[in-house]
Every structure is written in structure tokens, then in C-alpha cells.
Image: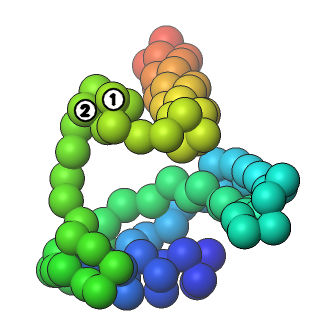
Amino acid sequence: MQTAQREFQEETGLQLAVHHLVACYAHASENVLSMSTLTLVYCGEICGGEMRDTVEGRPSWIDEASLLKKIDSRYGTMLRDYREQRDRRVLCATSVHDVREENL
């Protein structure tokens, strides 16, 4: 998690509080000119810093609908998995809250 926090801050200027690992994705390249990758997707939230440009690009905020139109299908899968996990967590939290209310 420390690596994710450090990379996020280096590339955006923002500090990240990592909550949990969402998933891991392995992509084996079939071409010697392309890299194979292992991508770890975390859920977290901004906890400080100021957004800034870096040599790697210009970070920006974009809504999910616009993002889905722009990203490669491989990353679309990652975003979909994150959204499904996020929605399940919200449903679980709501269910626990409802049960507690009923028991009061």
C-alpha cells in the first residue's frame, strides 16, 4: 500500500489514504516489444496535498460516464470491478444499518 500511496502522490501531488485492495490483474504480453504487467487496484480517498502536473502528465477529475467512453477495454474492466465492489459494500453497510435500527 505504501507504494500505491507514494506513486499516487508523485504523479498527482495528492496524498492518498488507501482503504483496501480491490483486485489484481495480470496481462501477459504476446509481443517482445510490449511489457507484461501486473496491476493492483486499490480503493482509497484523498487526504491532503494539492493536484499538480508532473512529467508524466496532467491529472484531472472526470465523471465515470465520460471516463468509460475514453478508456481502453482492459481498464474498463478494472473500473467495472471497482464499481461492483463499491456498490456491494454500500449495500452491506446499508443492510447492517437497517438491522441495527430494527433492533433498537
Q: Do the residues bearing badges 1 and 2 touch, measured as CB atoms within 8 Å?
A: yes
Where is residue 95 drawn, in percent x and y? Answer: 54, 19
Q: Is residue 72 left or right of residue 50?
A: right
Structure colour scheme? rainbow
- For the residue labelled by badge 1, is the local secondary structure a helix, a strand or a loop? helix
Q: CA distance from mark 1 to mark 2?
A: 5 Å
- Count residues near mark 1 (Cα–Cα under 10 Å), then give few for <14, some for 14-19, many for 20+: few
- For the residue labelled by badge 2, is the local secondary structure a helix, a strand or a loop? helix
- Count residues near mark 2 (Cα–Cα under 10 Å), then give few for <14, some for 14-19, many for 20+: few
Residue at image location 37% in from the left, 87% down from the top: 10
Q: Nearer the viewer, residue 37 or 10?
A: 37
Where is residue 93 drawn, in percent x and y? Answer: 51, 30
Where is residue 101 drawn, in percent x and y? Answer: 44, 19
Of all residues shown, which one is farthest toward the top? 102
Q: Is residue 53 above or below residue 91?
A: below
Q: Tag 2: residue type?
A: Ser
Q: Is residue 48 left or right of residue 91?
A: left
Q: Is residue 98 above or below residue 93?
A: above
Residue at image location 34% in from the left, 79% down from the top: 56
Q: Tag 1: residue type?
A: Lys
Q: Is residue 45 above or below residue 71?
A: below
Q: Is residue 31 left or right of residue 71?
A: right
Residue at image location 27% in from the left, 74% down from the top: 57
The residue to which callout 1 is attached is 69
Q: Nearer the viewer, residue 81 or 33?
A: 33
When asked about the image quadrant of residue 92, the answer is top right
The residue to which callout 2 is attached is 66
Q: Is residue 3 above or below residue 92?
A: below
Where is residue 27 drawn, in percent x and y? Answer: 77, 53
When asked about the image quadrant of residue 48, the answer is bottom left
